[in-house]
């Protein structure tokens, strides 16, 4: 076992060549995940609500979006945005940005399902009562349903964030220098300690993801007490 | 948009054969990994519920660790680092086989097993504990009670989530292209680099993934509608 290879390169694993060069490593992975979940939240919220609409021509695009995206591997989507954006846009996108777009579009479909399930899980009496007090449908949604539903969804969002953090490793394939790529770079340079290196980055991912998973479990338990019935 | 579409190129001759080969490899790797993952996942779940301290700790650690690390990293770990963890004899044997394929199968099976173990555990939890107690009182051993009373009921409930795990496995198998398993995504990528007609190649392979996924998720919906409703306690 040659753990010194890992320790010598540990700061490179954490932040890449920053501050002398571009940010990379774990910091880049986390940034991609945060940017991705932020974009995916709004995209997912929009499509989730569209899917709940009573008008079929609003529902249809949301159904197609969710089913198509959930039916294909994320890797496929990353390739679509990376190799095929130049064909459509006429110029190339930087790797990190095109990966980020892929993450947003991909995670958005899962968030849309979470939003839909969260709204449907709320007792329908909430909507009826809100409508009964004279709120319009949109007002009832914005002021009564969503504030409760979104709060109930927080644990699911955290779980989605965890799986997005794991998925950011796929940005490796198109050359974004996030944690997995920095590890392969070190591995290619050193060649002597692949098991130690990949085990180390697995542990780094694990620390981030498991902390969040544990937090979301706690949150779920605490929130179970304040459920609307 | 300056791009000459050439669908015939991808849908005939050598390139079509590549895509077909890719689909076959994708299905093979998914099927083999799924069988192994089911076996391993069931084992881990039963260990978790056995009540024997070291087994519970081991299986909890196993599920938590493999669920919270990226599959890609696990694939690299098994591919580049199997020397360090597997016995030399096993490695020798694996190198003689198709090593990329074997590393992919190990990674996919172990990763999916962690998820399957959790599904099975929650399925078993949904069977009232009295069932186990009653069968123990009838004189069955723990393993017999599991085998003949609890698991048959639990499996019926967890079929839909298990199928969606299988579907995830099928989609995740695309990551094996990174270590050179020649499955569908790898082939699409290869056609792209040979012909510059990536658009057509990726469209065809995306549609294949989509068709299989939608077919399976449609069957889950049907299953839920017709079968799950009849379970009563």
Image: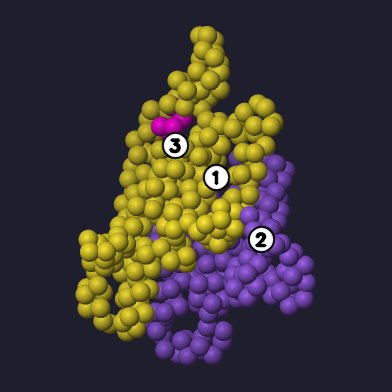
Q: Colour of chain A?
A: yellow
Query: Please, is residue B25 above or below residue A80 in the view?
Result: below
Which residue corresponds to mark 3? A153
Q: Colour of chain B?
A: purple
Looking at the rendered structure, whether the residues under marks 2 and 3 are on a common chain is answered as no
In the rendered image, which quarter is residue A182 located in? bottom left
Which residue corresponds to mark 1? A109
Q: Quadrant of the N terminus of chain B?
A: bottom right
Q: Which residues are magenta?
A: A148-153
Do the numbered discs 3 and 1 sit on residues whose CB atoms are within 8 Å? Answer: no
- In the foreground, B119 or B182: B182
Which colour assignment does the render follow?
by chain
Disc 2 versus disc 3: distance between alpha carbons?
44 Å
Q: Which mark is residue B37?
A: none
Q: Nearer the viewer, mark 3 or mark 1?
A: 1
Which residue corresponds to mark 2? B3
């Amino acid at each position: 076992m040659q753990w010194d290879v890992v320790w010598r390169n540990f700061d490179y694993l954490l932040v890449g060549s920053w501050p002398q060069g571009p940010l990379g490593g774990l910091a880049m992975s986390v940034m991609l995940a945060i940017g991705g979940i932020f974009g995916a939240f709004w995209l997912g919220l929009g499509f989730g609500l569209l899917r709940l609409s009573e008008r079929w021509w609003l529902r249809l695009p949301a159904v197609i979006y969710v089913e198509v995206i959930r039916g294909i591997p994320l890797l496929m989507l990353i390739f679509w945005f990376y190799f095929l954006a130049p064909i459509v846009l006429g110029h190339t996108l930087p790797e990190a940005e095109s990966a980020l777009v892929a993450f947003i579009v991909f995670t958005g479909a899962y968030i849309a399902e979470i939003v839909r399930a969260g709204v449907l899980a709320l007792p329908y009496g909430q909507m009826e009562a809100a409508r009964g007090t004279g709120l319009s449908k949109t007002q009832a949604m914005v002021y009564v349903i969503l504030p409760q539903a979104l709060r109930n969804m927080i644990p699911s969002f955290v779980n989605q964030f965890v799986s997005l953090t794991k998925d950011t490793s796929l940005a490796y394939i198109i050359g974004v220098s996030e944690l997995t790529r920095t590890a392969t770079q070190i591995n290619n340079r050193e060649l002597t300690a692949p098991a130690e290196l990949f085990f180390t980055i697995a542990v780094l991912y694990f620390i981030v993801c498991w902390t969040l998973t544990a937090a979301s479990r706690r949150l779920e338990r605490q929130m179970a007490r304040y459920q609307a019935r | 948009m300056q791009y000459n579409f050439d669908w015939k190129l991808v849908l005939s001759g050598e390139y079509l054969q590549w895509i077909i080969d890719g689909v076959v490899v994708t299905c093979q790797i998914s099927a083999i990994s799924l069988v192994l993952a089911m076996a391993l996942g069931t084992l881990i779940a039963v260990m978790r519920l056995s009540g024997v301290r070291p087994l519970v700790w081991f299986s909890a650690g196993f599920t938590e660790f493999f669920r919270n690390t990226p599959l890609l990293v696990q694939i690299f770990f098994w591919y580049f680092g199997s020397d360090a963890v597997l016995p030399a004899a096993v490695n020798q044997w694996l190198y003689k086989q198709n090593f990329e394929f074997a590393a992919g199968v190990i990674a996919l099976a172990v990763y999916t097993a962690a998820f399957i173990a959790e599904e099975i555990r929650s399925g078993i939890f949904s069977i009232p504990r009295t069932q186990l107690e009653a069968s123990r009182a009838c004189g069955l051993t723990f393993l017999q009670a599991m085998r003949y009373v609890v698991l048959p009921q639990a499996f019926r409930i967890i079929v839909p989530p298990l199928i969606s795990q299988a579907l995830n496995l099928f989609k995740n198998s695309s990551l094996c292209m990174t270590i050179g398993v020649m499955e569908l995504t790898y082939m699409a990528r290869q056609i792209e680099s040979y012909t510059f007609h990536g658009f057509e190649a990726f469209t065809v392979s995306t549609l294949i993934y989509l068709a299989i996924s939608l077919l399976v998720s449609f069957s889950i919906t049907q299953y839920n509608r017709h079968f799950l409703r009849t379970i009563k306690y």
